[in-house]
Amino acid sequence: MKQSVYSARSIRGLLMAGAAVGAVAMSAAPAMAQDIEEIVVTGSRIASPNLVATSPITVVGQDEIKYQGTTRVEDLINSLPQAFAGQSSQVSNGSTGTATVDLRNLGAARTLVLVDGKRLPPGSPGSGGSAPDINQIPGALVERVELATGGASAVYGSDAVAGVVNFIMKDDFEGVAFDYQFSFYQHNNDNAVASVVRARNFPLPDDSVTDGFTRDATVVMGASTEDGKGNVTLYAGYRKIDAISQAERDYSACTVAAGNGVWTCSGSGTTAPTRILATAIGGGTAPGDAQVRENGSVSAYTAATGAYNFGPINYYQRPDERYTLGAFGKYEINENITAYTQLMFMDDQTVAQIAPSGLFGVSATIRCDNPMLTATQRTQYCGSLAGTSNTVGMTLFRRNVEGGGRQSDLQHTSWRMVGGFRGDVGGWDYDVYGQYARVNFAQTYYNDFSIARGTQALDAVRDAAGNIVCRDQSNGCAPYNIFTPGGVTDAALEFLQTPGFQRGYTEQKIASGSISKDLGDYGLTFPTASTGVAIAIGAEYREEFLQRTVDTAFATGDLAGQGGPTLGVAGGFDVTELFGELRVPLVEDAPFVKQLTLDLGYRYSDYSNFGGTDTYKIAGDWAPIDDFRIRGSYNRAVRAPNVQELFTPQGLGLFNMDEDPCAGATPTFTLAQCANMGVTAAQYGRIVENTAGQYNSLDGGNPNLQPETSDTYSIGFVATPTAIEGLTLTVDYFKIKIKDVISTVPSDLAVNRCGTTGNAAFCSLITRDPTTGSLWIGTVANVLATNVNIASLSTSGIDVDLAYRFDLDDVGLADAGSLSFSMVGTWMDTAKSEPLPGEGEYDCVGLHGATCGVPTPEWRHRLRTTWATPWDANLSMSWRYIDSIKAQGTSSNPLLSGNVNPLNQKFKAYNYFDLAATFSPIENLSLSAGVNNVFDKDPPLSSALAAVVGNGNTYPGVYDSMGRYVFMGAQVKF
């Protein structure tokens, strides 16, 4: 009979399946009964008595969750070397308000996320939010997490390209438990950047800061029926996270730039006081690029002293408030039918704050009698024509420092309901269920500026009473006096600051059924084996729908700080699937073949938008002896285009680039190279640089997209040597190749390749402003970046999982408990991308940057050592290692190479050490405490980071950017 509770025998099996994490502390459980328990391991629907997976699996157990002080599930996953930083609480500019999982750095959309083997829905209808939001997972209810490497589409369907993350929940609880976690960050500000900040007279934080407080409380209640046939587990949780701004760390108190051997403070060319690009008339003497001074005059703008320090107001950690509620229930109606259900609810609200909005290069015609100009300015710009109706064409840059930072208030409310029946009929196991999930989304964007109203508020006159008023007083216009120091009024802000609204939802419906059987009961067993052939077959129907509506301000691109329009989207698709698996024991208990097993899988999927697709797997497992086995697999997987990729209307966005090679007085590219992308001789050498490094792109969907396809190969071994009791070692090589990747041509790559090669495939994507030649001023300039099936990706490497435990009695320390070690590490061999067929590929192993994205270290590991004392206490230390990383521009590959300042060239290797302890003073009380990043190591700094995940001069999702993480928790059971 199958059991619902995982015994120590199960844990050892999971270790053999590749789980060297989290299970070690459980391996000291008492010996079990002799009954063999069958369970289903992630990556297959066939229950197995020997618990050996033919594909690599890593398991994170309850102990690891406690040792890390986990309150955010994404932090737990991102600590593993297979996972890379994606959307998290440490993303501000570009945040979707969700938390995502990105295995192998292949993109969060290529990682399938499951809860007890069933899909988690798309996370958000907001832009970029299609990947599942693991904020929906209450950490206190997680029994363990299983990560399966590589393609698993034959078993689970679309999206399982990089792998599968399966959250196994506690669903058989009895009693009442209260879990409370409290944590905060402590950091000593002693970075050398502080002297640079001080030299610019920018504010510095206190020498020692304690902030980012998190409170997480969960109540779990469960009861079983008297006959033991049923159980209901209920939970409710509340989590509140305080914000941390970049102003609270000295190394992010200004936006750094790489100088001559030292960091300097850089910033944005949209400034406060106002920056003005104009050509004076009437013999005026104003510089062509000028900035307003405190005395009301203008003088030449210099980026070194005049750029706006936009970094400090950005959030390092977003404030967040989350409520969770749910229930897991099951009841054995009879020996053949068990009904079960899962109900999960989440309401999460967070705020992403970035630098103030303002006038980002607004073209305005300013009359020489405009009363907002000071007398000095009228003379400087108009000369002898001062006070007349003559006009000066100005391009104005002005930060809304009076109104404060732009704030994106993001709320996600999700429901997930599963109901089904499972059991045994005629010796066939079955599982039939329906699932409905919905995520409601609300975004309210505060403190942004209306572009149209900005132009209106700049044209001012004096009324009959001598007051300065708008020439056009419609809509309650109030003059925006950015020429006179201190001239901005509350009335002007009330007129200009325009909220933006987005609302929407995602909806997922699933009906699924499968049956499985050991066909050995019918005599279908190879003569060389004692275990029968096992089969699982089934069918699934799934609907996906998404809708996002936006207000006029978003849709028209009137919000100055958005970089262009944000358009609504609506659409959906459905898919009908048939699938099957076979597990074929070929040989058992023969000389040099203790076990030889073949696994086969196939799935046919019929999509409403593009038709049919096939996925399949072939895997094998050979154990010459009990202590050693070799496994290998091949998987064909697919990722169908999601609704946003298919149906998002096209509109302007932003991309990061170290420099526009055609901008500045001495451009990097020659005139001929710049002419390839439309720069005229008159514009060459006069195009204004963007010190913020952000340029316009034209983004959007494509309803004719086809699915991505991938091939995953893995081969490795599992060793559990009897001679070294308690040791488990797994080593697995993996290679994942993806073609027809839904992507855009990287905009910075298009600019680079157009200039260096003149290839029309790249140059046709670039449109420069016809007047200025700019790629960032105005709404005409852009680099085309709509979705297409054009690219290819591949990655390869080796995963190493090691677990070892021994009693200290064995080394002469009587009654001293036990010592255990667990290590999970990944060596990356390749991380290749080919943006356009035939145009070459680049490898991002050991690199980071605008094209490569987050750092991809060649080697990364986490090693934990735990002493289980005889006094109901465990002490644990973790060593996290991240290999050295170079800027992508240091690569010799022409697709990546560029000029890189020595300060930006390399991040040194990083070592972090964490300490944790658990203690149970009485039977029903468990306490935990710890410190991550014990030595308060500062993160590496760079002024050339990837977009979105690069934040505060570093990568907060990769490195510990906020200092020591101190946590403590208590769990009381009744």
Image (cartoon, grey):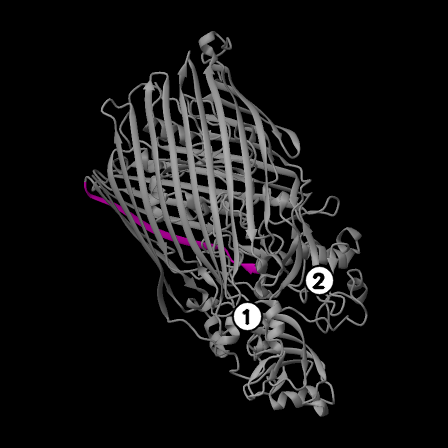
Work out whether residue 168 or residue 96 is closer to the camera in this orientation and state it: 96
Query: Is residue 771 at least partly visible in the picture?
Result: yes
Disc number at residue 781?
2
Q: Quadrant of residue 655?
A: bottom right
The rendered magenta stretch, by its main secondary structure, is classed as: strand
Work out whether residue 43 or residue 223 is closer to the camera in this orientation and state it: 223
Marks 1 and 2, how far apart at CA: 25 Å
- At a point 40% along the width and 42% down the height, the residue shown is 137
Circle count: 2
Q: Quadrant of residue 652?
A: bottom right
Which residue bears the numbered disc 1?
Answer: 496
Query: Is residue 618 at least partly visible in the picture?
Result: no
- At a point 49% along the width and 14% down the height, the residue shown is 533
Q: Which residues are magenta?
A: 906-922
The x and y percentages for residue 413 are 43, 46
Quarter of the image with the C terminus in it: top left
Q: Nearer the observer, disc 1 or disc 2?
A: 1
First of labels 1, 2 by sequence position: 1
Q: Are marks 1 and 2 in contact (CB under 8 Å)?
A: no
Work out whether residue 633 or residue 746 is closer to the camera in this orientation and state it: 746
The residue furthest left is 922
Is 671 positioned to the left or the right of 966 in the image? right
Q: Which amino acid does the dot numbered 1 rest on? A: Leu
The residue furthest bottom is 384
- At a point 28% along the width and 33% down the height, the residue shown is 173
SS type, badge 2: loop
Q: Which amino acid does the dot numbered 2 rest on? A: Ala
